[in-house]
Amino acid sequence: MPKYTFTVVMTCSGCSNAVIKAVNRIDGVKHVDANLETQEVVVDTEEKVGRDTVLEAIKKTGKVVKDEESNGQKVKD
């Protein structure tokens, strides 16, 4: 199960909730965690869900994703 980590500018619980809600709408997403303190969003997905799909969902919330080129890296469990 792939896990992706993104650095996202979030300033309040409304921001993190918007990101969680948007990413959870993607078919194949298993779990989303958005941490305000670290500005990290960690997404567990099925194999069929790619990094770009998750990135687009986050960006559609209007939140800024820092260092897009290096963000969304797969991390090992």
Image: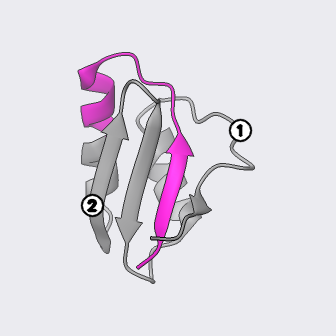
Does residue 13 appear anywhere in the picture? yes
Answer with left or right where residue 42 lies relative to residue 74: left
Check the image and report above or below for 71 versus 26.
above
Badge 1 element: loop
Check the image and report above or below for 26 versus 62.
below
Outermost residue to the top: 11
Report the magenta residues as a range. Answer: 1-19
Q: Residues within 10 Å of mark 2 (few under 14, many from 20)?
A: few
Disc tally is 2
Please give the name of the residue rendered at 37% of the width and 65% of the height, measured from the top-left corner: 44
The residue to which callout 2 is attached is 31
Does residue 25 appear anywhere in the picture? no
Within the magenta stretch, is there residue 13? Answer: yes
State which tag comes first along the sequence, 1 or 2: 2
Q: Residue 3, image x and y in percent?
A: 46, 66
Q: Amino acid at mark 1?
A: Asp
